[in-house]
Amino acid sequence: MTAIIKHRLFWPASALVVLITVNMLANASFARITVRDGHLYGALIDILRQSAPLMLVALGMTLVIATRGIDLSVGAIMAVSGAVALTIIDGSEDPGGFGTIMIAILVALLVSLVLGAWNGFLVSVLGIQPIIATLVLMLAGRGTALLITSGEITTVVSAPFKQIASGYLVILPVAFFIWVAAVVVVGVVERRTALGMLTEAVGINPEASRLAGVRSRGIIWTAYIASGVLAGVAGIIYSSNTMAADANSAGYLIELYAILAVVLGGTSLMGGKFSIAGTVIGVLIVQTLESTILFLGVAPAKSPVFFALVVIFVVLVQSPRVHRWGRSVFGSSRTSSAPDEDAEKKEVAA
Amino acid sequence: MRKRFLSTIALAGVAALGLAACSSSDDGGNGSGDGDTITVGFAQTGSESGWRSANTESMKTAFSAENGFELVFNAADNDPAAQITAVRNFINQGVDAIVIAPIVEDGWDDVLQEAKDAGIPVILEDRTVSSSDDLYASWVGLDFRTEGVYAGEWAAEEFGDTPTKMVVLEGTTGSAPANDRADGFNEAIEGTAIETIDSQTGDFTRDGGKTVMEGFIAKYGIDGIDLLYAHNDDMGLGAIEAIEAAGGVPGVDIKIVTIDAVKDGMQALVDGKINYIVECNPLLGELAAGLVKDVLAGEDVDKSYYVEDQKFTQEEAAEVIDSRLY
């Protein structure tokens, strides 16, 4: 039992479970899942589908944060990626053609890769502070997206492109499989090879890892490239969702929600140890919270405050210091476990 | 931080624009000596939507060289400080008249007073300011409240005494169009059997409209919703996607009424996916240009001019869609 409670994903996971339970109690239709044409529908399925863009962006953000960095440009890269893809489809003679879609997606991802590489270059080669380096693209990227779409909302009609965000594979949404695939790929590459350990080493102490022979420049650069490409995929899903490239609102403020999801998942902004599973849970918490606002019928004017209160609550529940305080107030019998908590904290901080 | 950074860029842009405009007006003065050209500075909010692009286009067409104007254009990227700087630049350049589409209502007293002291008349378009109305010559724009009333009147006529469950996609919380369109609509449906079962903001975007509508459908089911009122076309278009994805037929299973009448919205209306659209006319250029000429000629003008908005049913939309400019 204590082993479960001690697990670092225990608190984020319980927060998610509590959130879902509250929704079900408040409105039974939240849990209702219906089958139509062999496809599943319902609020929970919506959450799995809608979380795709945030999940991909947060995944990249986790890697960047692990290297002690931050990537503010992800929302702008989403806007550029969507604008590029839809402009290509819009300009082609066969907008519904499979070849057109493939070219549009490949070019959009290539552009995102270049933008990510630019961020990585500024940070790892020129040594510019990540928050400033990526701020450049955060501002310039959205402007570029507006230029690509000439300041208008580009819309297309293309059945195969629509499948990316709205289609189904077997019984679940395509977008869900896309983010699961991304999580698996990143998880395998980071955790089944030494890359994850090296990334954490760079994040914990760049200088020491360099002296130990870790090529930190390449690792940091790779993290920003991965973040850029994942944001590019997110941009394609976002634009496919409405079949429109809205350069003004695509990915607007998503960088902050991604950082929030990463932190809710237990990854420290100080860099070093990171948890991909934690980020997945963090994103699901944020997305479920968005649905909660709808299902509880929180008035629009009050919803930002509601959102903030829940986030503060979830963060407090996870804090070791609050746990200790809670134990000392409510039960003296368990104070003996406090030293362990301290030891664990030191280990993380080290 | 971001705001300040942006406004610095905008300021630099305004300065560059000012220099360019100064030098060009000097050329005009020394060269042909054409005294009939009216130099007008236009401070636009930015380029945030399709509506805004159409509005800018209309102003540029109306204040063209053929019509005897020289237009100095500035878009402030929705930064109020940059917009005030732009207006101040217009005053320093000594333009003949200034047209402003104010980003926010407050904070205009000083700069409007400066324009008045310099003897430059100011015409406001689209949004209003909270300053006293003797600081500007006139205002031309739209009545968001009436738009809401029109949409509500259609709903009242369509549903009347039939018990109707309605969901609302609101605009950006706290914005004038969102507030006024909600008030006007509610006023018009008072006493009918239309019941608002839920109302959430979709932030005037397609994605917002789609996400919120998906939530409504999960909550009430397609059968539990009869009518959707969206504060703009884009949110309505997003909601259409959500309804279709859930296996419903937009315009039939759930009737839809929206406001704006941009091209994509009108197309959806013609296609039968939207049932009724109230226009929010962005073509204010002609009227603004006329006002500038009248004011400079010393004629008396009213303090405010409302542009009449049109309303379209599916049949009416099919007739006019090819001739529309935006």
Image (cartoon, grey):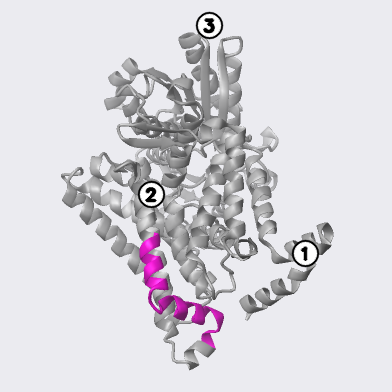
Residue B94 visible in image? no
Mainly helix, strand or loop, the magenta region? helix
Q: Can you tell which mark lies on residue A334? A: 1
Q: CA distance from mark 3 to mark 2?
A: 43 Å
Q: Can you tell which mark lies on residue A176? A: 2
- Asked if residue A295 lies in the magenta stretch, the reply is no
**Residue A76 coordinates in the image, percent (x, y):** 44, 58
CB atoms of marks 3 and 1 within 8 Å: no
* Residues marked 3 and 1, same chain: no
Q: CA distance from mark 1 to mark 2?
A: 42 Å
Q: What range of the chain is rendered magenta?
A: A183-207
Would you place residue B317 above or below residue A262 in this image?
above
Camera-nearest residue between A326 and A121: A326
**Residue that carries the numbered disc 3 in the rendered image:** B161
Q: Between tags 1 and 2, which lies in front?
A: 1
Residue flagged by tag 1: what amino acid is it? Answer: Arg
